[in-house]
Image (tube, helix red, strand yellow):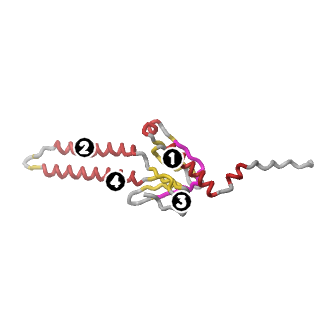
Amino acid sequence: MAPPLLSGETVVTTERQHVAVLVPVTLVALICLGVPLVLIQLVPHQVGSTNVSGAKVIADAVVAVVVVAWYLLRVLRWRCQTYTLTTHRIVLARGVVSRVTESIALDRIQDTVVRRPLADRLIGAGSVEIQSAGRDGTEVLRLVPKPDRFYTQILQAIEDYRVIAYPGAAEQGERAAPPAPQGSAGGV
């Protein structure tokens, strides 16, 4: 889902967190599904003179529905969290029912850092930290797949934006610096 774009703005790339963020959620879902289902099956079909097999089936169904609904909600949250790089800004969007969208203008970015601890490198992911003027702290994009590529795309987009926004700046940078002012001829 692409964010609303400004006039003249195009999407460079859209990323989301690495699919590995779903591994712990999947393990928890399997445990939360498996353990209660096994425990429910350990209850005998006959308790005293009452047949509880119908109640066991209902309990199994309730556990399955709750766990599957929780798991699907987590997958949907992952799917709806995106990092979109455009020609003018980086748009961070998250949320399923209630959406939150933040944007960082490319000309406000002061520093970017890629962090790739060993575990992240093993799965081909990393964190991209973006520090921008006028914001408190640093925005961290966690577990970005192929973070070096995304980092390079950000730097290229910043450079392209500067060339478009400030067309004479590149030429001025190539000129020789003006001569340094000379001290006054007379004494004090």
- Residue at 62% from the left image edge and 58% from the top image edge: 165
Left or right of 100: which side holds 51? left
Question: How many residues crowd mark 3 within 10 Å: few (<14), some (14–19), many (20+)?
Answer: few
Q: Say which of 53 and 94 sits in front.
A: 94
Magenta stretch bounds: 101-114
Q: Which residue is mark 2?
A: 34
- Earlier in the chain: of badge 3 and badge 4, it is 3
Mark 2 neighbour class, 10 Å CA radius: few under 14, some 14 to 19, many 20 or more: some
| Marks 3/4: CA–CA distance | 32 Å
Marks 3 and 2, Cα distance to the nearest angstrom?
49 Å
Q: Amino acid at mark 1?
A: Phe
Magenta residue check for 106: yes
Could you tell whether 65 is left or right of 111 in the image? left
The mark found on residue 9 in the picture is 3
Which residue bears the numbered disc 1? 150
Left-right relation of 45 to 79: left
Question: Dots 1 and 3: beta carbons under 8 Å?
Answer: no
